[in-house]
Amino acid sequence: MKSFFNNKAPYFFITPTLILLALFSLLPIAVALVISFTNMDLAGLADYSNIKFVGFENYVSVISDPVFMQSIYNTLFYVIIGVPLVIVFSLGIALLINIGTHRIFKAFRVVYYLPSITNVVAVAVVWSYLYNPSFGLFNYVLELLNLPAIPWLTEPTIAKISLIMLALWRAIGLNMIIFIAALQGIPKSYYEAAQLDGANTWQQITSITIPMLRFAIFFVSITTMIGWLQFFEEPFVMTQGGPLDGTTSVALFIYRNGFQLSNFGYAAAGSFVLFIAIIAITLFQFSLQRKESDLT
Amino acid sequence: MNSTTASSAKVGSNVTHKWFQWIAGTLLTIGGIIFMVPFIWMALSSFKLEKEVLQIPPTLWPNEFTLDNFKYLFNNMNFGVYLKNTLIIVLCSFCGLFLNAMAGYGFAKYRFKGRDSLFILVLATMMIPGQVTMIPVYLILNSMDLTNTMLGIVLPGLAGAFSIFLFRQFMSTIPSELLEATRIDGASELRIFLQIVLPISKSIIAVQAILAFIGGWNSFLWPLIIANDESLYTLSVGLSLLKGQYGGNYALQMAGATFMVVPVMAIFIYFQKHIIDNFTISGIK
C-alpha cells in the first residue's frame, strides 16, 4: 500500500499547479483560437447559442482597422526606441557600479532597482503629475532653465516618448542586476592579462567586457522586447491611449475591445496577431544571435 | 600608464582606478538623485494641502504638513476596503507559493513518467503573453461563475512557472540520501516535504515570499477585469479609479500613491540583499 502511494507521490505534488496552469495558461490558448473565429460578444456570453462562426472575418477586419494599425505602429515605436535605451542605460549603470569597490556602490544597486518593484499604477499617477503642463515639476524645471514648455502627454509623438521615459525608469533596475551578475562572472585573470599587455580601461571594456556579456545582452534584449511588445499599464493609466490613439498599444487595443466594448472574438483575433508577432520577432532574434556567434 | 617598470604601472593603474571610481561615483550619484526625484516629489506632495500643490512656483517642502489627504482616502474613499482586499490577495499568493514549492519539489526529487516533458510544458507557459490568455481566462472564469468574486481574482495567478522553476533549481541541490534516510525511518512523503524539505529551503522561500508579497500588493490587471463591485477592488484599481474621479487633486493622488509605494519600498530595502543576491544567483543561470 505504501509503495503504491510512493509511486503516486510525485503526481500528488505536481498535480495542483499543473491543473491551475492547464486551466489558466494552456486551455486559454485553445479557447482564444476558437473564439477568434466567432462573433463572441456580450450576447454570446449570456447565451452560447448566439455565437456564430465567422471564419477569418475578425482577422480580416482587425488587420484593416486603422486603430489597430496605429496601435501596431505605436508598439513598434515603443520597442524600437525603448529596448536599445534600456540596454544602454542598464548596461552603463551596471558598468559604473561594477567599477566601484567602495560600500556605497552597493547602495546604488538599491537606488536604481527601486523603481522596478514599485506599483505601476502608483508610479503612473506620480508621473502624470510630474508631466502636468501647468503644475508639473518637469515643465517648471524647463521654465527655470528658460526653455519652452513641453506638451508631455498632449502631443501624440511626445506622449509616446514620455511613456517610454517612465517605462525606461522602471525597466533599468532588473536588467542592471542581470548585467551586474554577468559582469561578476567574468574571470579577473582576463583583465590582469590585458593590463600586462598595456590595455587601458576603455580597451578592456570594449574587448573583454562587452564580448563576454554577449549572452546577457541577448537575454536582456529578448525579455525586454517581449515585455515592451505587451506594453499596457502605462498608457492605460496615464493617457488611456490618447491623444488621438497616439499612445494606444496593441495590448491596450485588445483590452479595450475585449473588456470595454465586449467584442471578445475580435479582441481574441487581435491577441493572436500579437502572439504571432512576438513569436516571429523572437525567432528572428534567435537566428540573428546564432549567425553572429558563427561569425566570431 | 606607459611606464616601463611593473611597479610604476601598478601605481599608475591604481591612481587611474581611483579616478575612475570618483567619476563613476559622481555620475551614479547624479543619476541616482534624478532617479529618486519622482519618489521624493510624491512623498512631499502627499503632505501638502490641495491648494499648495497647485501653487506656481511649486514648493519643494510643504509649508504646512497635513495628514488630511491620507485621512480623506480612508474616510471618504474606500481605501480601507481596498487595503483589506489587497492583503487577502497577498495571503492567497502565499498559498500559491506553497503549491509552487510542492510542484518544484515533485519535479526536483522524483523520477516519474513524463517528468521532463511536463516540466518543459510548465516552462512553456512562461512564453504565453498575458494579452492572449486575458480574454479566454475571463470567459473560463465566467463559465465557472467566478467573475466578480475574490476566488476569480486570485485563481489565475496562483501557479507560476518561474516560481516552480526557481524552487526546482534550489531543491535539486538537496541531497537525496537525506530524504532516503527519512523515508527508511518510515516518514510519509508529505511529512518529508513538510518537515525536511521546506525547512532546508528557507532561504528560497523567503525570497519568493517577498516577491509574492510585492506581486500581490501590486496586482492590477486581474482585479480590474474580474471585479465589477467596488467592494472587491484592490489598492491599484482604487488608485486608478481615484485618478479618474479626482483628476485635479494631485495632493490626494500623491497620498494614494505614497500609501502604495512606501510599504513595498520599506520591505524591499530591508530584504534587498537577499533579493538581489538571489537574482544574481538564480536569475541568470
Image: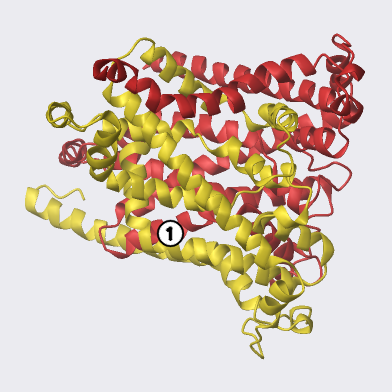
Q: Is residue B56 above or below residue A185?
A: below
Give A189 or B253, whichever is nearer the viewer: B253
Give A199 or A252, whichever is nearer the viewer: A252
Dot 1 corresponds to which residue? B268
- Residue appearing at x 79%, y 40% in the figure: A248
Residue extending farthest to the front is A1
The type of residue carrying mark 1 is: Phe
Give B207 or A277, whichever is nearer the viewer: B207
Quarter holding the N terminus of chain A is top left
Q: Please provide percent x and percent y for residue A203.
A: 32, 39
Give the colour in which the image draws chain B.
yellow
Query: Helix, strand, or loop for circle 1?
Result: helix
Q: Is residue A207 visible?
A: yes
The answer to which quarter of the image holds residue A181 is top left
- Residue appearing at x 80%, y 65% in the figure: A133
- Is residue A260 rendered to the left or right of residue B232? right
The answer to which quarter of the image holds residue A143 is bottom right
Give the colour in which the image draws chain A.
red
